Image: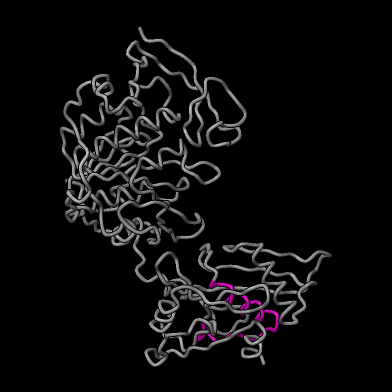
Amino acid sequence: MAKVKVAFFCTNCGAESPKWMGQCTSCKSWNTLVEEKVVQTKNDRITQQPDWRSVGNGAAAAAAGPIGKGPRPVRLDEVTAGEVQRLIAPDRELNRVLGGGIVPGSIVLFGGQPGIGKSTLLLQLALRLGKRVLYVSGEESEEQIKMRADRLGGSMDNCYLLTETNTDKLLKHAANLKPDLVIADSIQTLASPHVESMAGTVSQVRECAAELQRFAKESGIPVFLIGHITKEGSIAGPKLLEHIVDAVLQFEGDRNYTYRILRTLKNRFGSTDELGIYQMETEGLREVSNPSELLLSERDENLSGSAVCATLEGMRPMLIEVQALVSAAVYGTPQRSATGFDLRRLSMLLAVLEKRAGLSLGNQDVFLNIAGGLRVDDPAIDLSIIAALLSSAQDVMVSPDLCFAGEVGLSGEIRAVTRIEQRIQEADRLGFRGIYVSKYNVKGIDPDRYSIRIHTVATVRELYEELFA
């Protein structure tokens, strides 16, 4: 008869502990142990291990017993690596993020905030893939999914719905149907009958992910999992979940804006520097093939405090608008506010302006905004922020035909940034007439290749004199 015992599992690393402790002994995280019931059977006993120190005299081989059938060690030069035939999705942004398409037998995890559009994206993929897809939902009924599918449009002939949370039944239906793709929404709602605990617990998430991984590898059918995230922004469940899967994709965006960004946190079959951009519409998520034109479409050419930055999102060049407002402080303490940018780095740039450019901002309110609801961490945005702040403080417009790409150091120097040629090409393609970059960034660049004029600056003071002299 099965014996039930109580154990404690770490939600961060999945380590097991016989009793509750404030700190996990494995990953040293605080207050991450949760109580779960574990069923032990008579077969769960530890067998005696051979003494591996006696290898070579035949004792270890006799103690270990016969190897039996299964994989055996092979030399690496004997392994032949063939080209993987990927399943090409109709979604070009998803293909880019996955590294060129869906790899057979892969397991991909999608994470994101509630309501951001994870289920919409994958249901849209199921309806437009043109292959047999099994869509498993543990959160919504068949009627709810059908209503969303009617709104999204697409062919429903090859899309099969299954509202089930039991992994044994799920895998039996998948084995009988033999689909080209399985989508599970979500991994936290699935429960394995082999584990006596509630769905969403550490042991259940770990076991369900392992079962789906075995199914994907043995059958060659790719599996997409939707994962909930915690209030800290990480995927709920043990960290082991992210190690099990082949790719981890994060769906980001502000619910008050229509733009969504699909980032790669892990990818065993491609680069982690790619990203896809979507726009949420009534009919679903629309691919944004040229985000620069959309992000710059609402600019007014007659206002100060605005500058354009040639940034990179992953490997993708983008031009975005930076807006700044500098005004006299009404209250005693000046305000500092930044939307889509690190507030501490904004404080550093303001200190550089005061020290190196002689601009007094100690009694001024400063507000900074990245247009479009994006969040940018690229250091090359520093130069455009400096230009926008100077433009607002002087109330002089920066020419709408200019853009900027450069990192600002503490001594006021303009430092070189990576992949400057991609940034220049994107600005040239969109019709900008000039781009300001660091003078240390133009080595090896032929300016005659571009119709855009490349301006080089070395310090913040030099930029101030060129723009507002």
Magenta segment, principal secondary structure? helix
Q: Nearer the viewer, residue 123 or 230?
A: 230
Q: Is residue 318 visible?
A: yes
Question: Residue 72: percent from the left, percent from the top?
Answer: 20, 36
Which residue lies at the image location 70% right of the left edge and 72% below the top edge? 350
Question: Residue 349: percent from the left, percent from the top?
Answer: 67, 71
Instruction: In the rendered view, tell whether residue 125 sits above or below residue 432.
Output: above
Which residue lies at the image location 21% right of the left edge and 29% below the top edge? 172
Which residue lies at the image location 51% right of the left edge and 57% below the top edge? 256
**Is 90 on the left-hand or right-hand side of 457?**
left
Instruction: In the rendered view, tell whether residue 201 sits above or below residue 149.
Output: above
**Magenta region includes residue 49:** no
Q: Give residue 324's quadrant in the image.
A: bottom right
Q: Quadrant of the C terminus?
A: bottom right
Q: Nearer the viewer, residue 393 or 60?
A: 60
Q: Residue reaching furthest front? A: 57
Q: What range is drawn magenta here?
A: 380-403
Q: Nearer the viewer, residue 356 or 204?
A: 356
Instruction: In the rendered view, tell whether residue 156 sits above or below residue 29.
Output: below
Question: Residue 39: percent from the left, percent from the top?
Answer: 40, 16
Q: Is residue 278 visible?
A: no
Q: Residue reaching furthest top? A: 1
Q: Nearer the viewer, residue 57 or 439?
A: 57
Instruction: In the rendered view, tell whether residue 356 sits above or below residue 54.
Output: below
Question: Residue 11: percent from the left, percent from the top?
Answer: 50, 33
**Magenta region includes residue 394:** yes
